[in-house]
Amino acid sequence: MTGNQIPRIRIEPPRADTDGQGAAMLMQAYGVTLDEWQQLVLNAWLGKDRAGTYTAINAGLSVPRQNGKNTCLEAREFYGLAVNGERILHTAHQVRTSKKAFRRLAAMFEDRTKPELTKLVKHIRYAIGEEGIELTNGGIIEFTSRSRFVARGFDGISLVVFDEAQELQEDQLEALMATLSASATGTRQLIYTGSPPYPGCPGDVFRRLRQACINSAGNGKEHRSCWHEWSIAADSLQELNTADKRLWYNTNPALGIRLTEEFTQEELKMLSADGFARERLGWWSKNIDTEQAAFAIDPATWDACASDTPKPEGKTAYGVKFSADGSTVVLAGAVIDPAGLARISLLDMRPTGAGLSWLAEWLIERYKVASCVVIDGRNGTDLLVDKIKDTWRFKDSIIKPSAANVVNAATLLVNELNERTVTWYRPQELLRESAITATRRKIGGGFGFGGSGSEIIEACALALWGCRTSKRNPARQMRIG
């Protein structure tokens, strides 16, 4: 059994032809076979009128995570670059998301078994914040996170991709619209891909585009927008039985192909009913405006605590946070200098698919210099503890925090930011993104950090809390000795 290949909402402008089949054949030649649903989306994105102009100016795709929307983007960008010689700007909310998209596409142009493609490459830029691919046929693609695009000059762009579109904000859209210009064939296109906005999500552009597409399709007039959505239709959570596997298959086209029932079952256990409905069933809540959660950290307060100085010496602790879906593990550190000022830092972040041996070895090497390590997350915590417990033998040197501890850690960090008793290293852009986009996630009578990418700031909060509360201080012992 496989997931539904036809979206619940399918809005497409009329077309006389499409380059979608050609794009699929190009991907096939380089080892990627599109699913039926991906071909359907690509046909609409690359649909053409009789004059040969692409019919969709605005294209939206809302599909639950991990179904394969990135493959749709890769196919569109690959064809646009290699065949059309288009100038493309690929944007994402998170730096890491933009980097992943760049690496996937760059790998295709670096495949030495395909000399006809590598010969097209004029230059591939790997510098952080400057990632891009330039071809001899004039095709160019630039990759950027939307937190950095204002500082860079883009011009002559005919295709803009907004990945993680649920995070796209009004001012970002307005600034990027200035980069658009029609190509020689008259092509101008904006593609938005993402999932339903969550409570506290900062952007409402994606929601407005969705409604505009639905309205335009319903008024019977000619339109130049398309929208594809795999989702459930429900006014409230009370209408849903999230354990109903029929809903899973209706809303996840890759279920039975790349996603499994076992994985989805684990998500059902880990996520709240609201979270599972949004992330796995594609639910667009009609009451999102009344559900908006407050951001946990004021951006101005966060930026006021930035520091360009090196990490100080002092009492040290580490925080480890496994993401809610178990796909990522984050390592953070906290140091308290002799004057009592704390510094928090993002030390590393890797997919859990790479294993945990690297993390265990890293922590084992630092047992003698750190007061404690605080490890949180439903997936991976016990395995990591088992790997390091024989070395981290001191009482309370390994802490698996309770819900109350997590609340205390989040509250402590917010209070210290307000009181300017903690700093963070300014070049750590990923840390800043996580901090200023984290929302307040209700836990009992308090709050923890929530939202996309919040595991980074959560790890830092755990490290700071561990550093402030641990009675062990090897740094002091070494000075006495």
Image: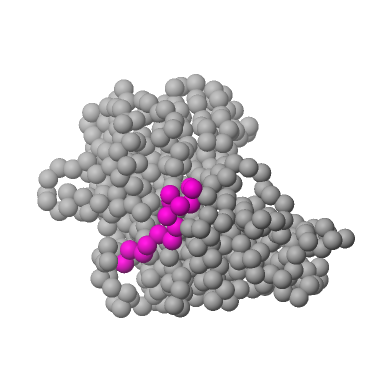
* Quarter-of-image position of residue 222: top left
**Colouring rule applied to residues:** one colour
Q: Residue at x 54, y 71 (%)?
A: 408
Q: Up-down: is 351 above or below 247?
A: above
* Quarter-of-image position of residue 190: top left
* 44 in magenta: no
- Residue 433's x, y, as percent? 48, 50
- Residue 466's x, y, as percent? 64, 67
Q: Is 131 left or right of 289, judged from the image as shown?
A: right
Q: Quick one: quadrant of the C terminus?
A: bottom right
Q: Residue at x 57, y 50 (%)?
A: 424
Tell me, yes or no, if residue 329 can be seen here. no
Q: Up-down: is 442 above or below 429?
A: below
The tally of labels here is 0
Q: Residue at x 33, y 52 (%)?
A: 203
Q: Quick one: quadrant of the N terminus?
A: bottom left
- Residue 340's x, y, as percent? 64, 58
Q: Residue at x 24, y 44 (%)?
A: 225
Residue furthest front in the image: 339
Magenta stretch bounds: 291-304
- Residue 432's x, y, as percent? 51, 49
Q: Is 291 left or right of 421, judged from the image as shown?
A: left
* 292 in magenta: yes
Q: Toward the viewer: 13 or 328?
A: 328
Q: Is 74 left or right of 183, judged from the image as shown?
A: right
Tell me, yes or no, if residue 426 can be seen here. yes
Residue furthest right in the image: 481
Q: Toward the viewer: 255 or 415?
A: 415
